[in-house]
Image (cartoon, rainbow, N blue to C red):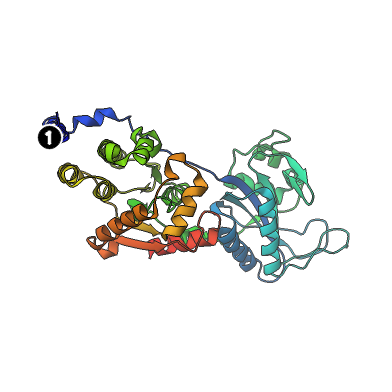
Amino acid sequence: MGAASKVLVCSTKILESRFVFLNFVLKPKFQIINHNNNIYLSLGSNLGNRFQYLQQAVDAIFTEIGTLHKISSVYETPALGFDGDPFLNCVLWVRSSLTARQTLKITQKIEKQLGREQKTTTVGYASRVIDIDIVLYNTEIFTEKNLEIPHPRFHSRAFVLQPLAEVNPQLVHPVLQQNVIKLLAKTKDGGAITKQSKWLRNPRQDYDISKLNYIAIEGNIGAGKTSLATKIATDFNAKLILERFKDNPFLPKFYEDQSRYAFPLEMSFLADRYQQLLEDIKQFDLFKECVVADYDAYKSLIFAKVTLAAEEFNLYKKLFNLMHKELPKPDVYVYLYQNTERLLENIQKRGRKYEKGIAPAYLNKINEGYLQFIKTQPQEKVKIIDVSEIDFVKNRKDYLAVLKQLLS
């Protein structure tokens, strides 16, 4: 039986059984990949406009360290261990990819930027415009120069325990193995703690993606689709759908012999993407604010046009159009553009053996296919973001800039 006849038989069976070939793929499962560390920071100020200093510190921590999962109420407490004006204190629960040492370095920089004077040789405590302490870093226990985790005195300080218990009452001291609520009840710190009526503002509100039900992030091979989708899903409690390219047995073979394996590769991807998007997006999840996917269904047609012969592509296109009608469409379509040179660098860095032979011409064709597709879409739904000269994985400011463009 010739190739064309096989294609025709396949087509007939698919149409008769309503895409029975979907049984060849595994049951899709969305996943949440969380590379974040849970960091608890204690903030205090007893000079000048105390509330304003706290807010400025909160804003800087969000911009340079990570997402603020929770912010406690603000509490006023008397100065401890010295004569001074009362403090305003709070605790932040931060999720970040930074190490504890990196976090310390940035908090010290923020303190300096806000006007805190450098520490002197004076014994004891002193008034300050801002004080930022790392209370806990995950459940880790270690002592380094100028950094001890957990903070050696937080278990006896009510002005830390009270807001800490507010943001996460289930926390357990990793050394004492006692719940923060119990530690608070036991503390002999008798200083008055007065809860303030004014709340600090979470800068996360400026990046609210909850109004978008479905975000599709696309781009060429090595553009950073999965990295961005994962970061957004983690930061904003979104349901994450990742393409299962690693499970496709035809992908490594395709890069070795494209003419032989192009058609089975594209058909298997089409089947997998269709089933995954149809089932996962339509499943209502009360605990997720929206859906973020690192691909859009139309990707199948873009790659198929580049890899398939004309006869195969014509059949493929008919099947795709039939299936595409049933799939939910994204509220916003994000295309991450990177120049070919940067794409090749990224591909080499991630070290997948079967990708090492990808030619620049192939990437250029894929990029052209995406741009042609984008021209046919409503412009208010499409966000083309040039990420050639930025690194939104390692640089949080770059990441926030990408989010602003997405939401603009």
The x and y percentages for residue 211 are 35, 56
Left/right placement of residue 68 relative to residue 230 reads right
Q: Quadrant of the C terminus?
A: bottom left
The x and y percentages for residue 96 are 57, 50
Q: Is 105 in front, or is 302?
A: 302
Q: Report the amino acid beneath label 1.
A: Leu
The x and y percentages for residue 229 are 42, 49
Q: Quadrant of the N terminus?
A: top left
Left/right placement of residue 346 relative to residue 186 reads left
| Depicted 339 relative to depicted 225: above or below | below
The answer to which image quadrant residue 380 occupies is bottom left
Left/right placement of residue 135 relative to residue 313 reads right
Residue 88 seen anywhere in this rendered image of the structure: no
Identify the residue position indicated by label 1 in the image: 8
The x and y percentages for residue 174 are 69, 36
Q: Residues within 10 Å of mark 1 (few under 14, many from 20)?
A: few
Left/right placement of residue 392 relative to residue 153 reads left
- The residue at 66%/70% (across/down) is 49
Q: Is 103 in front, or is 258?
A: 258
Residue 72 seen anywhere in this rendered image of the structure: yes
Badge 1 marks a residue whose secondary structure is helix
- The residue at 13%/30% (across/down) is 13
Count all numbered tags in the image, as a single digit: 1
